[in-house]
Image (cartoon, grey):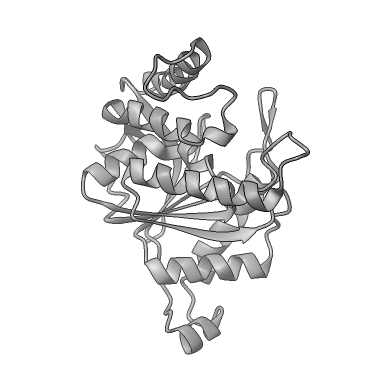
Amino acid sequence: MTDWPEDHEGPGHKILVIVAHPDDAEFMCAASVARWTSEGKEVVYALVTSGDKGTSDPDVVPSELAALREEEQREVCRILGVKKVEFLRYEDGMVQNTLELRKDIVRLIRTHKPSAVITQNPMVRWSGHYINHPDHRNTGDATLDAVFPSARDVHMFPELALNEGLEAHIVEHVYLGARDDIADVYFDVTDTVETKIRALKAHASQMRFTPANGAEPSDEEREFGERLAGWLKDRGAQKGIPYAESFKYFYLG
């Protein structure tokens, strides 16, 4: 497969992004999301957890942190043009690829009927000196199992059709976030780099600096933006694109 768009027909008109925590989607695909919404595509977010363990402060109450992070995610969605965000509210750090979670994700797919699903790569155990979070892996696994075959097959979770009117749905395009050699689709996000950076900064509870509020950004904040832009530039350089986000792609239509 060559670079998008020469030999790539996705993602279609409606995209469902499924991730483990608030800010996961922004690191993975926010610039692509901003591009798609600017083109008139509809994007829906689904978060398996609300990030209630995302702090090193023992005095923070997890339920209060979850509420804060949900509000931050809603603001991020406004920045990106995302129409809706769904919170499944599983416990942070405890996500498993269970039938319960798969059913909940099938419900989301059958409700929103996306042409494309984007999720985290369950095969990534580590990258360099970074050990991938188990919630990321298990969310990716559960999502892939929900997309194929569960959301597609009429006899999987038939109670969703019987009790909730949610009929089987085929997802045509599936993307796994990929910043390594398995990536085979690259989206040109040159026009939305700054939107991605702004979206990530809106996850203020997770920042190691205090985002500026009308004032000049601190050195730490400026370096954060430069580092993010550098990642996108490095990905684009693989294919002669100024700035890109990259994915492993599957066509299931």
Which residue shows up at 28% across the image and 54% down it? Answer: 12
Q: Is the residue 64 above or below the residue 234 in the image?
A: below
71 sits to left or right of 2: right
**In this view, which residue lies farthest toward the top?**
219
User: Which image quadrant: the N terminus?
Assistant: top left
Residue at (70, 23) in percent of width and height = 129
Q: Nearer the viewer, residue 78 or 120?
A: 78
Does 10 sit left or right of 210 as displayed? left
**Image coords of residue 220 (percent x, y):** 53, 14
Look at the image and tell me in which quarter the C terminus lies.
bottom left
Residue 128, position as x, y percentages in the image: 66, 23
Q: Is residue 8 above or below residue 198?
A: below
Q: Is residue 184 above or below residue 70?
A: above
The residue closer to the viewer here, 160 or 206, is: 206
Q: Is residue 1 visible?
A: no
Taking the spot 36% from the left edge, 35% from the top edge, the residue there is: 31
> Can you give x and y, in whole percent of width and height, for residue 218 in the image?
48, 13
Q: Nearer the viewer, residue 31 or 208?
A: 208
